[in-house]
Image (tube, grey):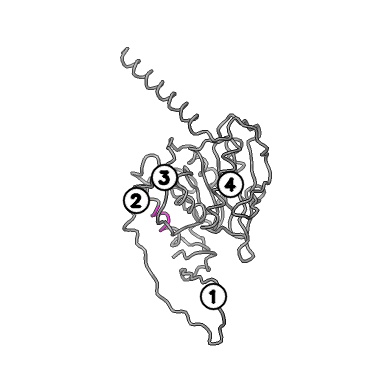
Amino acid sequence: MKNKKAVLCALVFIFIAIASCSALFFKSSGCGAGSTFTTGEHKIISNGIERVFYLKLPENYNSNTSYPLIFGFHGFTNDYTVFTKGDIDLQKVVGDEAILVYPNALDIHGEPQWDYESDLIFFDDLYAELEANLCFDKSKVFAVGHSNGAGFTHTLGCKRGNVLRAIGPVSGFFSDYDACTGQVAVIMIHGNSDTTIPLTGIKPTRDYWIAINSCKKAETPEGADPACVAYAGCDPQFPVKYCEHSGGHAWPDFASTAIWEFFKSLPLAVPSDKAGHGDVGDLGKGSVSFKIHYPADFVGTPEKLAVSLYPPGSTLPLSGSPN
């Protein structure tokens, strides 16, 4: 009996020691330092361009407390106000438990939208600025996004998996999953009545995360409303959940709570460049051959060309080719 108590006490001590060391090791450089950052709109120069972001600090922000850090990426034609004043209630759900950051996309052809390549530089610059000036836990950095912002969130999960712990994209997809860095846990949310990005467009993205995180396609109900499912056999630190609701191309009422609870439930994982080791070889990628015929009187060199493939009966996708 005494031996059992001794072992239990030792395990508790080890757990507390690991938790304490982890909290200390993963603190950002800005912990304990004075900062001029306050809740509100801020600007930063990135890649020679002035960029805007909104920062929401906990009401009684303490520079010695390492908070979780959540990035929120708005959708096509929108800006950060969808999080601060709009229909996305993430701020209300999270409250003062985390630092929230809502960057603005630049106008591309007259409309705000995320560039999945050049905005990686903006993310890196913004993260570096926050890391130097705010106190947060570098093992608890998350990203969420809607629509075009969800696509960028997926991209960050692939290209910046060494920075992010998990992602929560809503109504978005991505297809450029070659050469990913690091590994993330994932919760995806999508409406089965979405005609902007139909289910046929996002399921290959979902299947990628299932595969790369070594999950099986066997589903386990999670009890969310509407029903979310988790996938069996995932790498223990990198679960994958998928929530399919009856709505369209919108942020559903349950999304913020489901995402935040998922983030909080994750075990400690050390940020790393090591990518997931699941087998993605059978996901399949196709190719399309086509010809372009220029008008006989065409003069000059085309600046840009885009080809979109989309299912019959759906609307033309805002970006990319979901099918």
Of labels 4 and 2, earlier in sequence is 4
* Mark 3–mark 2 distance (CA, rounded to whole Å): 26 Å
Which residue is at the front of the view, 94 or 41?
Answer: 41
Q: Which amino acid is tagged 1?
A: Pro
Q: Main secondary structure of the magenta part?
A: helix
Magenta-colored stretch includes residue 177: no
Rate crowding at label 1 as few (under 14), some (14 to 19) or many (20 or more) other CA atoms within 10 Å.
few
User: As displayed, is residue 23 above or below residue 298?
Assistant: above
Where does the magenta region start and end? 204-208
Residue 146 pos. (x, y %): 55, 54
In the picture of the structure, the residue carrying the numbered disc 3 is: 273
Judged by depth in the image, the label closer to the viewer, 4 or 2, is 4
Q: Secondary structure at mark 4?
A: helix
* Mark 1–mark 4 distance (CA, rounded to whole Å): 33 Å
Residue 126 pos. (x, y %): 58, 46
In the picture of the structure, the residue carrying the numbered disc 1 is: 302
Q: Which amino acid is tagged 4?
A: Leu
Question: Residue 217 got which mark?
Answer: 2
Please state, as top left, top right, bottom left or bottom right, where the N terminus lies in the image: top left
In the picture of the structure, the residue carrying the numbered disc 4 is: 126
* Mark 3–mark 1 distance (CA, rounded to whole Å): 38 Å
Please state, as top left, top right, bottom left or bottom right, where the C terminus lies in the image: bottom left
Which residue is at the front of the view, 178 or 187?
Answer: 178
Q: Secondary structure at mark 2?
A: loop
* Mark 2–mark 1 distance (CA, rounded to whole Å): 44 Å
Residue 9 left/right relative to 194 = left
